[in-house]
Image (cartoon, helix red, strand yellow):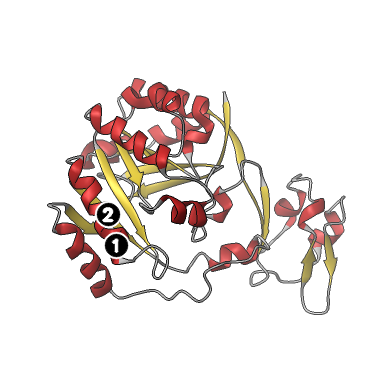
Amino acid sequence: MNGMIFNIQKYSINDGPGIRTTVFLKGCPLDCIWCHNPESQNTYKEITYDDKKCISCKSCVANCKNGCFTESQSNIRVNFETCSMCSECESQCPSEAIKILGHSKSVKEIIDEVIKDRMFYEESGGGVTFSGGEPMMQIDFLNSLLDHAKSKGLHTAIDTSGYCSEEDIDKIIDKVDLFLYDIKHMDEEKHIKLTGHSNKQILKNLQKLITHSKNIWIRIPIIPTINDEIENILKIGEFLNSLNQKKVFLLPYHNISKDKYIKLSRNYALNDIKTRSHEYYEQIASYLKKYNLNVKIGG
């Protein structure tokens, strides 16, 4: 079985306990306006062009059979619409200004790569994390990855928005040692506005996991002026307390993904949002701690 991934990150320390390898699957059903991995949103291959790396050698112009690249006065122009993802331009680009994001990989290829660092997992209490995008979008592929990872004795985690069917949760629930579970907003209408979808199934699936006594780390991306209002924070705290869910991580907003949108020729919606100080996140954490939650900033 093959699936579409866009990265395998070694020596990750922010996606679960210990030293881990994080496998990023492509595709996400949500459309969060702050998404810091825009290359993860679509299920298909995409081309990126970094004009800062381009040395104007024009090898892409000469080698592209679809005419996607044309010369301009100062750099190269790219027609993203006509690209067939043949990768010829990527292989010919000496400065790595052109990259194809998304690669079809077999379960065996991925697990063989992950298992290379078994020694680090064993020494640190780490393992493999499947992230995205939303890994649950490729449920059969994810299910097979988990089967193979468990057969190798690996600790498994998935980083999920929880936006999926209960049936899909049932397929993988007994094969996951840790769920990294996002909560973005408690108000359904605002959640729809910010992500394109309701939060009802997300909250329902979280309750299901807790009922099954699964190990869960709640992760809350805090986006200034977007979902950081006190009312939302207090509702999250109240909800988690009612479920007796204690472990919470606040994920600080950063705007370093802006360049990713430029490379993909997309608009970035949060150009005016500024990063905030550690004290800002400490204040938000203090609200949540009133609900007897174990709150950490980052990771």
Cα separation, mark 1 vs mark 2, equals 6 Å
Residue lying at 24% horizontally and 51% vertically, measured from the top left: 248
Q: Position of residue 139 (x, y in %)?
A: 50, 28
SS for tag 1? helix
Residue lying at 27% horizontally and 52% vertically, measured from the top left: 236
Q: Position of residue 54 (x, y in %)?
A: 69, 69
The extreme bottom residue here reads: 73
Residue 168 shows which numbered tag? none
Q: Is residue 213 above or below residue 251?
A: above
| In front of the other: 63 or 158 | 158
**Residue 249 in the figure: left or right of residue 98:** left
Residue lying at 20% horizontally and 58% vertically, measured from the top left: 288
**Residue 31 in the figure: left or right of residue 262:** left
Q: Position of residue 130 (x, y in %)?
A: 42, 38
Quadrant (top left/top right/bottom left/bottom right) for the C terminus: bottom left
Q: Position of residue 149 (x, y in %)?
A: 38, 27
Residue 235 shows which numbered tag? 2
- Say which amino acid is labelled 2: Lys
SS for tag 2? helix
Q: Is residue 251 above or below residue 188?
A: below
Q: How many marks?
A: 2
Residue holding disc 1? 231
Tell me if label 1 and label 2 are in contact, CB under 8 Å. yes
- Say which amino acid is labelled 1: Glu
| In front of the other: 99 or 63 | 99
